[in-house]
Image (tube, helix red, strand yellow):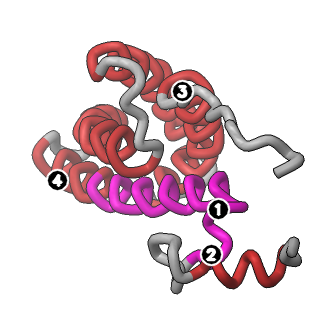
Amino acid sequence: MPTTPIIESFSRVKTQPYYFITPYYHKDKHVLTLAKYIGVQFLAYALDMGFFFLFVYLLGGQHIQANVLSKLFSGIFSFFLHRHFTFKSTELSPRTQAIRYFSLLGLNIPISAGLFSLTLQFIAPPALAKFVSDAACTVLSYWISKVAIFHNKPSINKKSIDT
């Protein structure tokens, strides 16, 4: 006897990991990936801002250089968490993914620094200017990371639609 999607959905809830957080995990894998990405980015951004303030202090107020250095440190942190937690992407070698990720970071840092420099002209507090410029770069970075760096081959469903 075929089950309705609602009953089938409730029967799967107890077998899915983190069912209390995401009861529709099996249907919304992309939403969960985006949520993990945002969570990791939040942690990386806290690290980024911490290093930013540290480097501003150590470099005597050099905001652009402090931004570049803080992005390097948070980028290393982000790479490992995105590879093993967010995208769980192990199909490509770590070296290949690292080269791709840090190439993206190499492109992202000058774009972020340029946006930060531009934003500093309109927003006085450097921390707020950094937040605005980094927020603008986050969406682009997610899309590139998902498509070009941590992509997984689509899984082939071996079940027939008739069964």
Of 102 and 162, nearer the camera is 162
Q: Amino acid at mark 2?
A: Arg
Task: State which mark lies toward you, 2 or 1.
Answer: 2
Q: Which residue is mark 2?
A: 12
The secondary structure type at the circle numbered 1 is loop
Q: Residue furthest left?
A: 58
Of 17 and 49, nearer the camera is 17
Please report the bounds of the magenta region as a residue range.
22-47
Q: Residue at x 32, y 56 (%)?
A: 49
Left/right placement of residue 26 relative to residue 83 reads: right
Q: Residues within 10 Å of mark 2 (few under 14, many from 20)?
A: some
The secondary structure type at the circle numbered 4 is helix
Assess whether residue 33 is covered by the magenta stretch. Answer: yes
Of 50 and 150, nearer the camera is 150
Mark earlier in primary sequence (2, 1): 2
Q: Amino acid at mark 3?
A: Ile
Q: Amino acid at mark 4?
A: Leu
